[in-house]
Image (spheres, grey):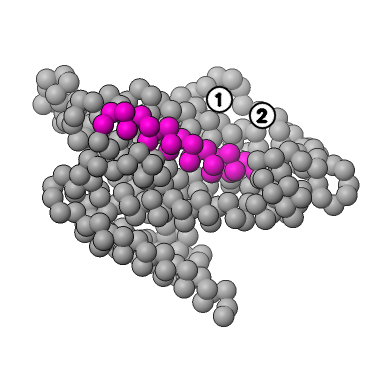
Amino acid sequence: MSVQVWTYLLVGITFALYIGIAIWSRAGSTKDFYVAGGGVSPLANGMATAADWMSAASFISMAGIIAFAGYDGSVYLMGWTGGYVLLALLLAPYLRKFGKFTVPDFIGDRYYSKTARIVAVICALIVSFTYVAGQMRGVGVVFSRFLEVDINTGVIIGMVIVLFYAVLGGMKGITYTQVAQYCVLIFAFMVPAIFISIQMTGNPIPQLGMGSKLADGSGIYLLDKLDGLSTELGFNAYTNGSKSMADVFAITLALMVGTAGLPHVIVRFFTVKRVKDARKSAGLALLLIAILYTTAPAVSVFAEPT
């Protein structure tokens, strides 16, 4: 079979898996629809949260921006990771303890103000629409490449699939679909990274491979070669940053505060039974996210010499 046939087959199997999970775990009550019945295990919730976090920006663009900007690109890595830590430590457990399903509910009750609640709703809608627009564009780009369709057609395909399992299964269906999604995403990201690392450095661990010597017998470290290539082209060394400390601080802070307020990630912590489970799932999610976030710089380094 040709590569294109294999692509259609694998994408079709993935879609069938997502739809099958949505049908199996379809919502049977209002609580199931909005917070998955509040009975999701910490591990499943951690995997679903990690899948939420491993969005188009992280999965498609993280390695690209680090490859393009070098050391300066790592500020995005720090900012997005820091945003999750901010959310997990300072927001999620307390929202869960308060017992409300949404942030606007929390804001309205906490400050005894319908006006504050309306403002929170407006902010949530603006953030959601802005975020979804970027995500759907990413979906369109992926499908246009792999399925050889127009980007707009790719967006429509992605929206139909998501709409189907979101409406049918609600948060319960979405949660278990995202558990499967995490497995698919991390497999798709790690397998090429491992084999490229073996090919270029002989080390099967990408995170260690990026700091290893090249396997061509030259005895040159991979990062040293990248520094040489960058300076030869008239740029700063790959491992040196050009941003000032103030720029790094401002960008990191903006990314942290912005990502900590993502509504679709915050609601994840309402799907577990107890506040203790919310903290546990936050820790597991951070561990699972770290697998991709520590591999992305390695993938960017491997891409440069080729």
Q: Amino acid at mark 1?
A: Val
Residue 186 in view: yes
Using the image, determine if residue 270 lies above or below residue 246: below
Q: Is residue 284 magenta?
A: yes
Q: Between disc 1 and disc 2, whose residue precedes?
A: 2
Crowding at mark 2 (Cα within 10 Å: few <14, some 14-19, many 20+): some
Tally the marks. 2
Q: Which label is found at residue 149?
A: none
The CA distance from mark 1 to mark 2 is 10 Å
Image location of residue 295, percent across then percent down: 59, 43
Outermost residue to the bottom:
1
Q: Residue at x 58, y 39 (%)?
A: 294
Magenta stretch bounds: 274-298
Image location of residue 123, percent across then percent down: 25, 33
Residue identifier under label 2: 241
Using the image, determine if residue 95 lies above or below residue 194: above
Closer to us: 134 or 107: 107
Q: Is residue 22 magenta?
A: no
Looking at the figure, which quarter contains the N terminus?
bottom right
Q: Residue at x 82, y 50 (%)?
A: 215
Q: Amino acid at mark 2?
A: Gly
Q: Residue at x 71, y 33 (%)?
A: 239
Whether label 1 touches label 2, CB < 8 Å: yes
Q: Is residue 305 left or right of residue 91?
A: right
Looking at the figure, which quarter contains the C terminus?
bottom right
Closer to us: 273 or 67: 273
Quadrant in the picture for residue 180: bottom left
Quadrant in the picture for residue 129: top left
Image location of residue 171, percent across then percent down: 25, 48
Residue identifier under label 1: 248
